[in-house]
Image: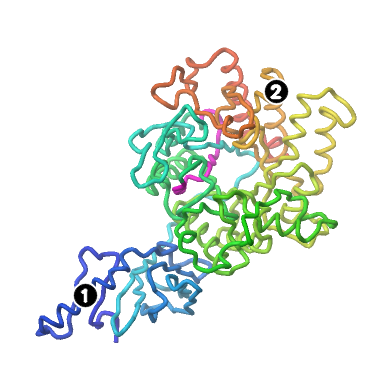
Amino acid sequence: KSLSEKPLALRMTEFSAAIITFTNRNVSMKKCMSLVVVCLLLGSLLAQKVYPPHWWVGMRQQEVQVMIHRTDVAASEVRVDYPGVTLLRTTFVENPNYVFCDLSIAENTAPGKVPILFTRNGQSEVLEYELKYREARSLAYGLDGSDFIYLIMPDRFVNENPGNDIVSTTLEQEVNRGYNNKRHGGDLLGVIGKLDYLKDLGVTATWLTPPLENNQPLYSYHGYAITNHYALDPRIGDNEQYRLYVDESHKRGMQVVFDVVLNHVGDQHAFIRDLPSADWLNQWDGFTRTNYRTSALVDMYASPSDRERMTNGWFDTQMPDLNQRNPLVAKYLIQWCIWWIEEMQIDACRLDTYSYADQDFLTEWAIAINNEYPGFTEFAEVWVNGKGVQGYYNGNNNLKTGVNTHLDGVLDFDLYWGIIKSITEPFGWEQGTGNLYLRLVQDYMYGDNGGAGNVTFLGNHDIDRFYSMAGEDIQKYKIGVTLLLTLRGIPQWFYGDEVLLTNFANPMDTVRVDFPGGWKADASNKFAAAGRTATEQEAFQHVRKLANWRKTHPVFADG
């Protein structure tokens, strides 16, 4: 029988108007009541979670794995009936509340709602899984040396919508700008409202720390403990606003960088509260923290226990460590990223805590993204002080490591320390600018591109503010900015450094200050020239002039 002929079909995307069709219209009241009871029992499907929420026809990879999370779903038989779509396999795990359905989507399949039929005890219900048309894209993918990335912590930038500062459904119910570890209220509409300011500064791409749901009881503002991979945090905005942010950026010739966290999630995530299987996470007998030693992974003398603790230890107590060696976890994470790129038309990805995840998986991830989106840019956080270790993680590095990450570059901590030394130390063979030179001559370790794909920087949300590192000396500050914007690589800027925000990273949260003028009650507005001091304006104009100049001078943009 086709699904339309089944005696009971609950189409869950339209459950509020669900119609129950009986094969015998003269059914007795007793039978009718029995069916009502069955409907109530099957109503548990209303609370189910489906990931990815939808997919597309015409993808290069013509398979999608749909993860369905609902009570006791393993007791159901699963079928699919839709032209061009084949159910390749269903995978059940230790937890009976999960099923993974692998769908093959033929090349000429029509968009529509694919009925996934669940049958249990002779009763059937339908989940309608939508396949959409792919959106035509006119913009080319790829960041290069002519770009200037601006890094923003949304909670600390601009509070355009105070109405979403506190949301009743979230665990953290406090907004307090007096404490750096509390939420402050910045949001996505605030970012959108300042895109013209950023364009004038010379910015060509924005990178937001993860804006996805972080429904954690503490420290939820920073975004790196994701609790829902497919929804924005309601205190930041919603998915529609995120697409608006992308569209408004593209209208201005600006790209969007998506911050990807593959290593861990927040402990309030739905699949942590109801774990699919024991091997979904890297589990230890007791809480075991990572040793944070990326160098152990490339050290030929390192002990196996050091390497294991680096990749399998937890980043923090509230951040369970995902086991990407589990193929279901790997597929989930790869599809999550593809979904956001396709749904929102994102232009590039930054990978958080890259070296903490499983390297075989990370390579698989990059190959999958590059296959689906040729020319797409991926760069990774590899926080080390050493060219050799950084070079190990660059794609096509020509090193005899046996590893090709297929990445375009890494965040260039090695160059950062060279610039810092050049403005804080006297000149010497291995000091000051001499130290910077010795670092640059080792760029051959990055392979044929010589580090051109690396993202260079003077500040981010984890390290000291650059003006503080320069001793609040405007001349040293300007030298550092000049080096950043005339050397190879893709320069990245940290919000507020153009108006000389200060502080040190210990404690870490103190560098994550609010941008003055982003809140209506602020005493000054440094988004406007009138709100800046003479020194702040000098700094702003220096950054602005060089950032815009670099875009039109290929000798610097291209190395």
Most extreme residue toward the right, as rendered? 429
- Residue 180 placement (x, y as % from top left): 52, 31
Depicted 479 relative to depicted 96: above or below: above
- Residue 286 placement (x, y as % from top left): 62, 58
Q: Which residue is mark 1?
A: 37
Most extreme residue toward the top, as rendered? 534
Question: Which residue is nearer to you in this view: 213 or 178?
Answer: 178
Q: Is residue 502 magenta?
A: no
Question: Which residue is at 26% across, 76% downward?
Answer: 9
Please, what is the three-letter code of the amino acid marked with disc 2? Answer: Ala
Checking the image for residue 470, the label placed there is: 2
Question: Which residue is nearer to you in this view: 487 or 434?
Answer: 434
Badge count: 2
For marks 1 and 2, give the CA distance. 71 Å
Question: Which residue is at 57% across, 12% downward?
Answer: 534
Left/right placement of residue 262 relative to residue 442 reads: left
Figure quadrant of residue 480:
top right
Question: Which residue is at 60% across, 45% downward?
Answer: 143
Checking the image for residue 288, the label placed there is: none
Depicted 290 relative to depicted 125: above or below: above
**Residue range corresponding to the magenta coloring:** 200-216
Q: Secondary structure at mark 2?
A: loop
Left/right placement of residue 72 relative to residue 21 reads: right
- Residue 112 placement (x, y as % from top left): 34, 68
Q: How is the image coloured?
A: rainbow
1 vs 2, front mark: 1
Left/right placement of residue 486 relative to residue 126 reads: right
Q: Secondary structure at mark 1?
A: helix
- Residue 225 placement (x, y as % from top left): 52, 49
